[in-house]
Image (cartoon, rainbow, N blue to C red):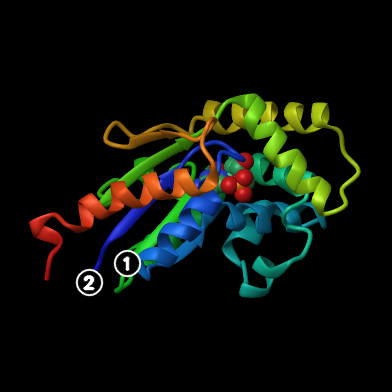
Amino acid sequence: MKFTVAIDGPAAAGKGTISKGVAAHFGFAHLDTGLLYRAVGARVLGGADPVGAAQNLTPDDLRGDNLRSADVAQAASQVAVIPDVRAALLMFQRRFAGRDGGAVLDGRDIGTVICPDADVKLFVTASDQVRAQRRFDELLAKGADITLTQVGADLTARDARDAGRENAPMKQASDAVLLDTSDMTIEAALAAAIAVVQRAVSLPENQG
Ligand code: DC
């Protein structure tokens, strides 16, 4: 059975947690596509050429323990502007989406560019203030030396770059369901996402 769930949205809106939870609930595979761009960004910070890095990513590159840092996040957003970097990562994402047994992909352009025919599309967002606080709490828990103001400024810069680029900008697909998690607990947000996916799974064309 092929079934693709596309989950897009800005940084720290909760899409990672929701995607993992949806995948676990339905027994689907999950791909955090931001991690691909982060792995390329990390290699560029280490001196590599962005396009070469994207063309030669290895599973080991996805395991780096610095991939969640603020510096790597900015580098990821910068390399993501380069069309040849995006092109190098496209087929891997599409193959993953088409695997048997169902797949959840989260990112910025999944519902618009990578999987325009996805069975379900969600656009997960939250207010700037809530997202900054969530990401600040996460980074703090990892022992990062950073302020809430810095985190907010980083997110604003990244959102502007991700939404403003010419190639595959972050954008809600016209057929995506909007989920604003600003005033939701993670449990409530996940339940809402599962309900949307369940409706699509239950459609007659997806039965059997
Ligand atoms: O989801 P994330 O915060 O880990 O993503 C890091 C950066 O990667 C994000 O700022 C933009 C880029 N990205 C992208 O351009 N397209 C995607 N599908 C996923 C991430």
Labelled disc at residue 102 = 1
**Residue marked by disc 2:** 1
109 or 134: nearer the viewer: 134
Q: Position of residue 53 (x, y in %)?
A: 66, 60
Relative placement, left or right, of 2 versus 95 is left
Is 14 situated above or below 20? above
Judged left or right of residue 145, residue 102 is left
Left or right side of 9 for 99:
left
Q: Residue furthest left?
A: 204
Residue 91: tell me if it is visible.
no
> Would residue 156 be found to the left or right of residue 151 on screen?
left
Estimate how packed mark 1 is, as few (under 14), some (14 to 19) or many (20 or more) residues with alpha carbons within 10 Å: some
Residue 98 in sight from this viewpoint: yes
Q: Ligand 1 is located in which of the four quadrants?
A: top right
Considering the image in quadrants, where does the C terminus appear?
A: bottom left
Q: Is residue 121 above or below residue 198?
A: above
Kindly identify the amino acid type of the residue bearing the numbered disc 1: Gly
Tell me which corner region of the image, top left, top right, bottom left or bottom right, holds residue 175. top left
The answer to whether mark 1 and mark 2 are in CB contact below 8 A is yes
Beta carbon at label 1 within 8 Å of ligand 1: no
Dot 1 falls on a residue whose secondary structure is loop
Place of residue 156 in the rendered image (x, y in percent of width and height, measured from the top left): 67, 26
- Residue type indicated by callout 2: Met
